[in-house]
Image: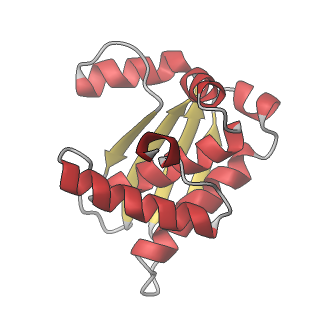
Amino acid sequence: MIEVEIEDVAWTSALPHASAAAERAGQAVLDEIAPSDGEDQGVAVLLTSDEAVAHLNQRFRHKTGPTNVLSFPASANPENHLGDVALAYGACAREADEQGKSLEQHLIHLVAHGVLHLLGYDHETDGEAEAMEALERSILESLGVPDPYAAERA
């Protein structure tokens, strides 16, 4: 189950169906990687501001400034909550513009990316990055979103 909270109205001003897009992306990852065994797995997605993500980034990662997406895996719990994903509107909108893609496509990609982190995937090494990006491409293709890494590989 994907719960979306919109804290910054800039998200819905720019993308009225931001909540539905985020929910669809997160659920696609869960359906692909962690099919339900009868128990819903929970993920909370927070669509917020650069300022809020900068605060989280400083508090939990000791890094200054906003980033596009942060993932916070939950420790094992009886509620089967996998964790939380937070996205910064300004950072995401700027990146989408710079990369020549729609905000919706970028949101879907970053939610999928964040949920994969909650499931234990990472990109610290080249091998991990290749595996994670392959999963992202497959999931995004199923959602009709073009390969976000195509330009890097060209």
Query: Residue furthest toward the bottom?
Result: 38
* Residue 9 visible to an observer of this rendering: no
Figure quadrant of residue 97? top right
Q: Position of residue 69 (x, y in %)?
A: 45, 36
Q: Residue at x 61, y 27 (%)?
A: 89
* Residue 142 visible to an observer of this rendering: yes
Q: Position of residue 81 (x, y in %)?
A: 39, 61
Figure quadrant of residue 56? top left
Out of 23 and 3, give the one closest to the viewer. Answer: 23
Out of 124 and 84, give the one closest to the viewer. Answer: 124
Residue 91's place in the image compared with 121, above or below, is: above
Query: Residue furthest toward the front?
Result: 154
Q: Position of residue 22 (x, y in %)?
A: 62, 51
* In this picture, residue 120 sits left or right of residue 86: left
Q: Position of residue 129 (x, y in %)?
A: 28, 51
* In this picture, residue 31 sits left or right of residue 63: right
